[in-house]
Image (cartoon, grey):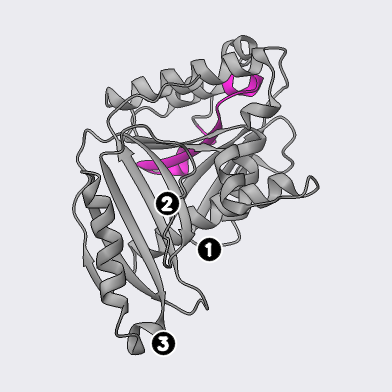
Amino acid sequence: MDKVIGLGSAGVNILNQLMNYPQYTGYFIDTDVTGLKKNGFYKIEEQNSPEDYEANCPSFKNFLRSAGPEVSVIMPSSGHISGVSLALLEQIKDRKINIILVRGNERQIGAHTAAIDRATTGVLQEYARSGLFNEICIINNKQVEEVLGEVPMIGYHDAINNMVSNTIHMMNVFDHQKPVISDISTIPEIYKISTLGFWEFGEKNEEKLFFPLDTPRMMRYYIAINQEQLETDGTLNKKINDFLEKTKEREIDISYGVYSTKYDKNFVYCKAYTNIIQEIK
């Protein structure tokens, strides 16, 4: 069972989507969550600034006692509640921590919020690269919106959160599923910074990442192909090899698996890795 902490509205809402699947145990932390601590809900008092959130951060020791030796933390990069993040991470530093950092649409935030975003994203990347965290996966709402196409205002965040949670979940499923064919290699320890991606597998195979990762060093592809097509399409092997070759031409290492699905369409789920600190403008 995967243990996941959702911090703030961004983390809580994505975690809510993941909880539709039985593989996850969730711990919800926000100012307006409802439920008992023993059931995984921790309501914290609203504060006036990130500094106040950090200074008045409660102890989560008992609340997270059952979280186990490895935990994923879904958290926002901005907003006042982001001040809880460093205090929370300090309290669980003895565990293997995977951070999923959700950045808001920069076109919709003001200068103060943007400054918090830059500071949080920069500090967490430095900590991850130094080895304090196992990894940090950065997600931009703006890029997820571009993957989705036109998204109505009502239901906007639900669509974003659903895309992110579905991508996380499907990659997790494939990690526990035997591929039809694969060349899966270990991700080097130095590649601590990453993002996700998702697109339809076809003629163009336009790569669509959830964050514009600068200098990707390695790509891990989960190529999801319809079962019937795997059994009948004699051109499929060449198409997959051509797709992989394009990445190699960019001097990027690849690791991949081809997986059988019942989907009508074929898709690529992706995780891109780098060791380069990403500049947030």
> In the displayed image of the protein, which residue is found farthest to the right?
154
Left or right: 199 as drawn, with respect to 16? left
Q: Nearer the viewer, residue 176 or 108?
A: 108
Region rendered in magenta: 62-83
Q: Residues within 10 Å of mark 2 (few under 14, many from 20)?
A: some
Q: Position of residue 257 (x, y in %)?
A: 28, 65
Mark 2: amino acid: Glu
The label on residue 228 is: 3
Measure the alpha-carbon separation of dots 2 and 1. 30 Å
- Report if residue 160 is visible in the image: yes
In the displayed structure, does residue 211 sit left or right of residue 141? left
Residue drawn at point x = 26 percent, y = 36 percent: 191
Q: Is residue 78 magenta?
A: yes
Inter-mark Cα distance, 2 to 3:
25 Å
Number of other residues with Cα within 10 Å of mark 3, as a class: few under 14, some 14 to 19, many 20 or more: few
| Mark toward the viewer: 2 or 1 | 2
- Callout 1 amino acid: Pro
209 vs 52, nearest the viewer: 209
Q: Which residue is mark 2?
A: 207
- Compare marks 2 and 3 and give the one earlier in the sequence: 2
Counting labels gives 3
Q: Which residue is mark 1?
A: 22
